[in-house]
Structures are given as C-alpha cells and as structure tokens.
C-alpha cells in the first residue's frame, strides 16, 4: 500500500504531539537567500546568532566571505572542543530496503547484492573492528522492518555494547517505545536524516515505502529523545533540493529540538550527493566551497554541536574541515554489509572517497596538532 | 607561615588546577611542569580502558588526580561514575559535574547537591562544580563538600569572571575553599579571581587553545601566584563610587 501524499502516516506510525515540524515549515516557507554582505558581517560579530543571522551565513553572498566565516568557525570549534576529534566507524548489518528513494544505492528497485549478517557474523565484525582501537560504533541497516526487525537490531546493539563504549544506530524511524527498547539494549545515539525538508522535493524523491511519510520521519529525533536516547543527529542530503534551504531547515530542526529537550546532545552530518550504484550525478551538485559553507554555518549557529565529516569526501577536504568546523570523523570505513572481518555480504550504499585506517587517521590528526578521542562516554 | 591550600586533608602549594579535556595528550606533561600544577582533572569518560592512548600515561607521578563525572546528567549517574573512578584506582577525590543542558553546559546545582551528599558519606573528597548561588553553596557545605567550585563563565567561553560579584559572596560567606572552575580565558582573569580571595583557579580551554601551550601555562602560574600574593598582602582602601566630600559630613554633631 502506498501513501498518496507524503504528509500521511501509516497505521503503525505513532503520532506525537509536537509543534517543531510546523515551526520549521513556517520558517522555510518564508526562506530566501536574499542577504547583503553586511548582514553576514553583522552575524559574525554577534555572540550568539539569531535564526536570521543563521540564514545570512547560508546565503549566496556569504560564499564570498568564506575566509571571515572560517575564522569564526575555527574559533568556535576550538573554544568548545579544543583539540579533540572523536573517531568512530559504521557497521552495516543489512542492506535490505523497502523504500524507493531515487537517490539511494539501497533503493528497493535497485538490482544490488542484498545481505544481512547473522549474530555470529555481527560478532566477528565487532571483534575485528574493536581491534583497531575504536570505541564508538554506528550500526546501520537499510530500511526494512520486515527483514531487519527491531528485535534483530536490538540483538546487534546488545552485542555491540560488549565491545564499544558508545553505540549509535542509523536505521529506519521507530516509535517511542521501540527507541526505548533499543536504549535498554544499550544504544546511545540515533542518527536519522530528513534528506530534504522541502515537501515537494521529498515527494519527488521518495516514491514508495514507509519513508514516504514526511512527518513520521521528521519527528523521529523527538521520539528517540522521549525514548531516552542521549543524543540525536540531523542532516539533509545536500543537493537533493535547494541545499541552502535544506541546511537552514536542518539547523532549525536541531535548534527547536534542543530548546524543547535541553539535555539532548545534538549532532549534524552534512552529506552531499555523490555517485552510487544506479545514479551517477544526475542531481544538482554542491561544490566543496558550498559544502564548507554549510559546515561552518552549523558550527557558528550551534557551536556546541558535534559535526561529522563523511567519508564521501576526499581526504584533503576532510582533513581541513576537521578542527575548522567538524569534530567527528569515521575511520576504517566499509559501507558494504560486513566486510571488516570477512568478505562483504551485500553491496555498498554509496562510494567512499576516504578509505584510510584508524591508525592513518590518528596519525593525520596528530600531525595537525589534533587529539584523537576514542571514547567520550562512560556507560554506568 | 607557609601558605598552603588544604583539600580533604591534603596540602597543596600550587593554586592552579589543570583541566584536561581539550589538550593534545602529549602536551599534558609540559603544561603540568610549566604551570607548577599539583592537581589535574581527569574525565573518566575519556580515560581509555584498553584503547590505544590513555591519558593516565601522560600525567606525571605525584600529581593528584581529580577525576570528574563529566557526562553525568543526574546525581545517580554522577555517583556511579565516582564509584567507578575509585574502583579504577583513581583515588578519593572527585569533582562532581552534573550537566543536563547541552547548549550552555551549565551545571545542575540541585542534582549536584544530591550527588555530593551521597559521595561525601561514602568517604569521597567531593569538589562540586556549581553555578555560584549562595543558597546552593550552603547546601553543599551541609552535604559534606570539601570545596566549592563556582563557574566564572560558561565552560569554554574564555569570558572571565562574569559572575564576579556572586563568587565574592561565596568567598565572604562560605567557609570552604572556593575554586573558580570555568570561563577563565586569560591569566589576568585568573589573577583577578585570586585577588578576590578564591582559594584556587582551574583552567583548561584557555591554555589548550593557546598558540604556545607551555608558555601560556607558565603565564597562568605567575598570574595565580601574583593574585594570591595580592590577596595575602591586603588591599589598600579603594574608593569605589565618588570622591569623598572635602569637609566632614558629620561635623555638625555636638555630642
């Protein structure tokens, strides 16, 4: 059964009372990138930025002021994080998916090798990853409730906490009680990305599957926090729609959520569209300068937030963004299903541009005067 | 008479406590040496238990560890982290940090008082990080704290003594060492805090983000010592508002 409009919920989807989505939608409806250089400079001179200032930092004119923005961004990063850079790695345990998202390698219509790891295989992978010294793991699945059930993911989380001090999950959206269950299994953080906050773009890109429900996805972070998760991550897939507007909405989404739940730890990710199986750059591309602009706007608007830089980007870009705006990066990355201890069992979601090992990333950080932080959380 | 800082029955000559969360680990040693540091905090959540680098390997022998409970969001978590710290052999000192605001990282005084009470009863030397509120500080005294650690400004802001007047109230009213814990961005601000009569100053970001970390550590050492000396020397009378009237205002009194 397919949803006619993206604003619907399917029967199993919990509807929570929240005004965050309405607030964000109202703000982006009036969004325009129409700012002057002095708006941008004014924003940079303020201690804490208003929503208007934040929009100015994302505007086209701000692209010409990268250097000034970078100065402020670096200062904020240093102030809030010092030399510390957190390291983690993702582990894909299944790539089955029920959604038809036109930009994604896991699209259910794509003819790729599908796979799902058994408990034994998961444990082997975990053991192999933990030997690199990494202490934080991000568990990922494609979005299939049927094949990778909440219970299956729960078991994987329970195994992961045996080897890692911090476990994040990047899976399909859940109801509050399901997040609560995974929290009890040991999950600490939830990453979930809206991809595009623009309803029309969202509609065009999500043709079928549960992911078509825009509001259910939107309220995932709030349900996760209600379910007891320590922190949540936000992001848009930049380049799907108007990246400035999507970045603006992403920041606002996080801003309103943090206001409502002050204890929630906030994190951003800023992926842009890259080539993958079934799609070779048919969408608008976001340049490196524009991508950096988004990173820096997130940093200056919410200086306390953790920002992740993806392996989709080349090493030279990652190494420079880290410490300037980003504070967290992955190492020893594989984006196929498994592949750390044995041959991978399913195809990749996207292509990575940085395959450096944990040791290599550690050394790079050291050479740049930065400190790799493997664990920043104590499970008590 | 020797000027020493007494914390939990232990004596310290240095009044500069080092925070450790934002350094490159290999910098720790030089900062401790140049800063004349005798006590350094240790975020237990950062202390690797079997990973590739352990901060404990970088802190020289003889330095008193002040493990903190960063990451705790309520009293219960803080208590558990403190107990774990003792089990791991990090000693009886503990700096309570209970933070449940991810934006400003302001401490939760209420939960901090609860954790202090529990841990003091268990024999910990409890040093709670707090927002400088006199009433909360009195509760901390009653709960068995060994010192009170008010913030000068929000963590990491380097804004200095934004809460100066309130810290002064604590210095005047609370009969425990007052240690300014966060917000100190420059040696001059550390000096100013010491001149107020606080017992010690803690800093981290200000040193960690300096271009020459070692030199900044030694600048802090001098500043803290100068401020302490000024406090001990006693200030001359400083007129705060306006000049005094040249003829006496009470000259009309006959008896």
Image (spheres, grey):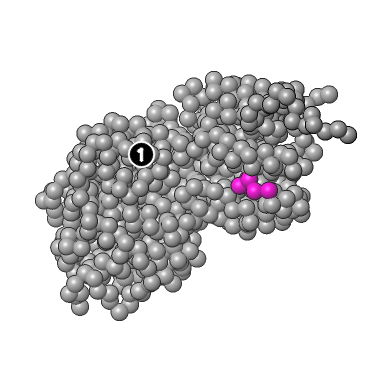
Which quadrant of the view contains residue B73? bottom right
Direction right: furthest residue: B255
Q: What element carries label 1?
A: loop
| Residue picked out by circle 1 | A325
Q: Is residue B130 magenta?
A: yes
Is A151 or B194 nearer to us in this picture? Answer: B194
On whether residue A317 falls in the magenta region, the answer is no
Taking depth in this image into account, of A160 and B58 the one nearest to the observer is B58
**As drawn, A116 above or below B125:** below
Given the image, what chain letter belongs to the residue carrying mark 1? A
Q: Give the range drawn in magenta.
A: B129-134
Residue under the point 40% across and 27% down = A367
In this rendering, does residue B59 appear at all? no
Number of marks in picture: 1
- Quadrant placement of the C terminus of chain A: bottom right
- Left or right, A11 with respect to B148, comes to left
A200 left or right of A180 in image: left
Could you tell whether A48 is left or right of A68 in the image? right
Instruction: Name the residue: 13% across, 48% down.
Output: A284
Residue B189 position in % (x across, y down): 58, 29
| Residue A31 visible in rendering | yes
- Badge 1: residue crowd in 10 Å (few <14, some 14–19, many ≥20): many
- Name the one closer to the observer, A211 or A6: A6
Q: Residue at image x 31%, y 69%?
A: A216
Q: In which quarter of the image is the N terminus of chain A?
A: bottom left
**Height in image: A380 above or below A308?**
below
Expressed as whole percent of the image width and height from the top left, the position of residue B122 reads 75, 53
A298 up-or-down from A180: above or below: above
Q: Which residue is drawn at 49% across and 22% down?
A: B212
Percent x, y for residue A157?
44, 61
**Where A20 sits versus B200, above or below?**
below
């Amino acid at each position: 059964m397919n949803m006619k409009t993206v604003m619907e919920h399917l029967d199993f989807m919990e509807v929570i009372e929240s005004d965050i989505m309405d607030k964000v939608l109202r703000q982006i409806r009036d969004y325009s990138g129409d700012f002057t250089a002095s708006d941008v400079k004014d924003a940079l001179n303020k201690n804490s930025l208003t929503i208007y200032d934040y929009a100015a930092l994302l505007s086209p004119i701000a692209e010409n002021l990268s250097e000034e923005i970078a100065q402020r961004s670096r200062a904020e990063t240093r102030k809030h994080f010092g030399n510390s850079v957190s390291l983690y790695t993702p582990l894909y345990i299944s790539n089955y998916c029920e959604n038809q998202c036109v930009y994604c390698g896991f699209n259910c219509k794509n003819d790729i090798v599908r796979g799902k790891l058994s408990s034994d295989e998961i444990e082997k992978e975990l053991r192999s990853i933990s030997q690199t010294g990494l202490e934080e793991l991000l568990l990922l699945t494609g979005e299939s409730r049927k094949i990778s059930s909440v219970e299956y993911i729960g078991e994987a989380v329970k195994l992961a906490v045996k080897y890692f001090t911090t476990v994040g999950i990047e899976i399909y959206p859940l109801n509050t009680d399901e997040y609560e269950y995974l929290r009890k299994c040991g999950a600490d953080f939830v990453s979930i990305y809206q991809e595009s906050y623009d309803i029309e773009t969202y509609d065009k890109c999500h043709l079928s599957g549960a992911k078509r429900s825009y509001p259910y996805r939107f309220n995932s972070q709030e349900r996760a926090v209600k379910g007891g998760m320590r922190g949540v991550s936000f992001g848009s897939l930049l380049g799907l729609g108007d990246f400035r507007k999507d970045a603006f909405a992403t920041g606002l989404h996080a801003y309103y959520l943090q206001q409502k739940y002050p204890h929630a730890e906030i994190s951003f990710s800023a992926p842009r569209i890259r080539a993958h199986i079934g799609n070779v750059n048919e969408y608008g591309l976001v340049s490196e300068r524009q991508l950096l602009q988004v990173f820096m706007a997130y940093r200056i608007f919410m200086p306390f937030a953790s920002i992740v830089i993806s392996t989709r980007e080349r090493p030279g870009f990652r190494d420079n963004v880290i410490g300037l705006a980003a504070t967290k990066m992955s190492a020893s990355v594989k984006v196929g299903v498994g592949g750390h201890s044995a041959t991978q069992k399913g195809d990749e979601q996207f292509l990575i541009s940085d395959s450096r090992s944990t040791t290599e990333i550690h050394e790079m950080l050291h050479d740049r005067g930065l400190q790799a932080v493997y664990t920043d959380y104590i499970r008590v | 008479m020797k000027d020493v800082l007494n914390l939990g029955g232990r004596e310290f000559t240095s009044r500069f406590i080092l925070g450790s969360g934002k350094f490159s680990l290999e910098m720790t040693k030089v900062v401790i040496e140049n800063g004349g540091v005798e006590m350094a905090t240790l975020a237990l959540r950062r202390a690797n238990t079997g990973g590739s680098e352990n901060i404990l390997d970088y802190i020289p022998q003889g330095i008193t560890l002040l493990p903190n409970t960063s990451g705790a969001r309520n009293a219960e978590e803080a208590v558990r982290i403190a107990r774990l710290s003792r089990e791991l052999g990090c000693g009886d000192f503990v700096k309570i940090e209970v933070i449940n605001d991810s934006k400003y990282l302001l401490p939760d005084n209420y939960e901090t008082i609860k954790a202090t009470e529990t841990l003091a009863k268990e024999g910990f030397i409890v040093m709670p990080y707090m927002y400088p509120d006199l009433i909360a500080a009195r509760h901390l005294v009653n709960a068995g704290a060994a010192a009170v650690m008010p913030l000068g400004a929000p963590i990491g802001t380097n804004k200095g003594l934004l809460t100066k007047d309130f810290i002064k109230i604590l210095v005047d009213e609370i009969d425990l060492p007052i240690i300014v814990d966060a917000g100190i961005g420059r040696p001059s601000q550390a000096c100013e805090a010491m001149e107020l009569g606080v017992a010690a100053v803690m800093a981290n970001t200000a040193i960690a983000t300096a271009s020459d970390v070692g030199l900044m550590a030694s600048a802090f050492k001098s500043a803290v010592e100068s401020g302490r000396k000024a406090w001990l020397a006693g200030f001359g009378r400083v007129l705060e508002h306006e000049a005094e009237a040249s003829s006496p205002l009470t000259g009309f009194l006959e008896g």
